[in-house]
Each structure stands twice: as C-alpha cells, then as structure tokens.
Amino acid sequence: MLEKNNLYTAELVQLSDSPRFEFILSNPDKVVKKNNPLCGDSVELFLKFDSLKIFEISFQATGCILCRASASLMTNLLYGKEISYARNLKNNIEKFLMHDSNELEKDLKVLEIVKNFPMRVKCVMLSWNLLEKGLEYE
C-alpha cells in the first residue's frame, strides 16, 4: 500500500540515484532536449531508431527525483522496443496520471504515487513528452 503523503518512495529515489541508461549515446539518429524553466528539470534524449523500432535510447537529466527516475524508467522499458509500444506506453502513463485511468503497466506502478501530487505530474511527463518529439521523423 502506498503512503499518500510520501512522494519520494525508496524505489523512486533508487531510480534517480542509480539511473539506467544515463549516458551520451554515440552516433545517435536524433538528440532532443527539453527543460522546465519553472522548476529547473532538464532532460536530453539520445535515440537510435527507424520507423518501427527504438534500437537504443539513453538520456542525461538534471532536476528532481521524479524527473530523473521517470527518464531512467522510460529508457529501461523502451530500449530495443517497437515504437508503437513506446507510444502506447506514453499514452498509458499520461492517461493514468492526468485522467485518472486505473490501467497502468506493471513496470510503471512505481510512479503511481504521483497521482496524489498533481503539480508534480509534469516532472514525470517531461521525458515522456520529449520522447514523443524525438520519435518524429523530419
């Protein structure tokens, strides 16, 4: 059972302190960066992909625990996955956090606590919204 008053769970702190895939990917197909000037969160994504699949993904992030943990979780879940899966997962988490859907991928349950802190949803969604921009073909 999640304690509704404790935003920074041990799992989120662990994901932030020891992030997965936090490095500059060599020879990426695309690099995208976004920041939130109101809070100081900043994420940069490095992607190797084609029209169907994310071959490799990594990130660099500064900011709060939620921002870093979300980017870490996202890159871990999407490394080597189909783009359709990535988009569905992004939509799933967005609906869950913003529209009170009860369906959330098991691997994303660590972010469930954020529903109790609506002002912090933007921290979690920064990397996911950036992913959407990164997967656009130009």
Image (cartoon, rainbow, N blue to C red):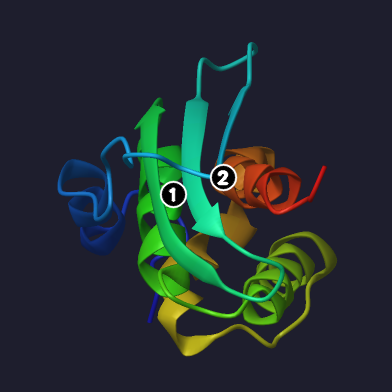
Contact between marks 1 and 2 (CB within 8 A): the answer is yes
Within 10 Å of disc 1 (Cα), the crowding (few <14, some 14-19, many 20+) is many
Between 86 and 12, the residue placed more toward the observer is 86
Q: Which amino acid does label 1 sit on?
A: Ala
Please say if 87 is above or below 84.
above
Between 114 and 18, the residue placed more toward the observer is 18
Q: In this view, does 66 lie to the left or right of 133?
A: left
Q: Is residue 68 left or right of residue 87?
A: left
Q: How far apart are marks 1 and 2 (CA)?
A: 5 Å
Please say if 117 is above or below 39.
below
Q: Which residue is drawn at 35% across and 53% down?
A: 72
Q: Which residue is drawn at 32% across and 39% down?
A: 26
Q: Say if residue 6 shows up in the picture.
A: no
Q: What residue type is labelled 2?
A: Ser
Q: Quadrant of residue 92?
A: bottom right
Q: Position of residue 113 (x, y in %)?
A: 49, 63
Specify the label residue 127 is tagged with.
2
Query: Which residue corresponds to mark 1?
Result: 71
The disc, 1 or 2, on the residue closer to the chain's N-terminal end is 1
SS of the residue under disc 2: helix
Q: Where is residue 98 in the image (x, y as percent from the top left)?
A: 78, 59
Q: Is residue 54 left or right of residue 13?
A: right
Please say if 130 is above or below 61.
below
Q: Where is residue 135 in the image (x, y as percent from the top left)?
A: 70, 54
Q: Is residue 3 left or right of residue 95?
A: left
SS of the residue under disc 1: helix
Please say if 89 is above or below 117.
below
Q: Where is residue 79 in the image (x, y as percent from the top left)?
A: 41, 69
The quarter of the rendered structure image containing the C terminus is top right
Q: Residue at x 47, y 88 (%)?
A: 106
Within 10 Å of disc 2 (Cα), the crowding (few <14, some 14-19, many 20+) is many
Q: Say if residue 107 shows up in the picture.
A: yes
